[in-house]
Image (spheres, rainbow, N blue to C red):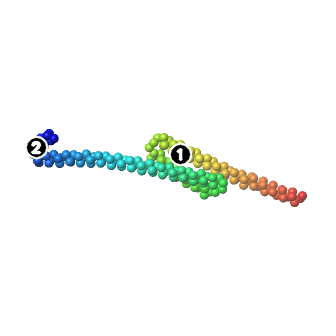
Amino acid sequence: MNFLNDLGSRFKIGTRIGGGFMLIIALLAVVATAGYFGLDAARIALQRYDLMSSNTLRLVETEREFVGLRRNVLAFVQRGDQASQNRVHELTKHLDENFKKLDENLILPEVKESVRRAAGLVDQYVKNFEVIVKNSAARDRSVNEQTNPVGAKMRTLITEIIDSA
């Protein structure tokens, strides 16, 4: 305590007030610097959260579109309608866009690799669908050009046999 009294009595009152003011300014600068770096860290964390939530939303949309793709492939296989085939092509475009955006925005390499594998499987699925489309056209042609005429002849022949019996 004696030391502080000696230190305080050595300087004039103006010097002591100026020193106290400078000490307060220095403390204020330390608090401002700490606040700046804290807010900067919060900004970085918020950007990371935004990226993660956007990627999660994109993954959920991709999963939903793939379910729609499978549903439309099944509808095409069962009914052979053109609307289902067109919808499959639309959903394929959306899935490709989502996979590209995910590949650009993902950070973790293992998740990126999983998304690339999934994109490859979707491509393979769509290629298999195109094979189904080609085969269904061949099947329809075969049914219309071969099976139906033979069936009509068989029906006529059986009808004649029944009539003669």
Residue at the spot x=14%, y=40% of the render? 2
Residue 103 visible in the picture:
yes
Pick the quarter of the image with the N terminus. top left
The secondary element bearing badge 1 is classed as helix
* Mark 2: secondary structure: helix
Which sits in the foreground, 99 or 110?
A: 110
- Which residue, given by chain and number where applicable, does mark 2 sit on? 9
Q: Residues within 10 Å of mark 1 (few under 14, many from 20)?
A: some
Name the residue: 60% across, 53% down: 71
Depth check, front residue: 78 or 49: 49
Front-lying residue, 99 or 11: 11
Residue at the image point whose x is 84% and y is 56% from the top: 158
- The three-letter code of the residue at mark 1 reads Ala
Tell me the kind of residue under disc 2.
Ser
Is residue 89 visible to the viewer in this orientation of the structure?
Answer: no
Determine which of the numbered discs, if any, sits on residue 68 in the image: none
Q: Is residue 83 left or right of residue 8?
A: right
Check residue 119 in the rendering and tell me which mark sits there, or answer none: 1
Q: Please name whichever residue, 16 or 161, is drawn nearer the observer in this view of the structure.
A: 16
Question: From the viewer's perspective, is 5 left or right of 33?
Answer: left
Disc 1 + disc 2, Cβ < 8 Å? no
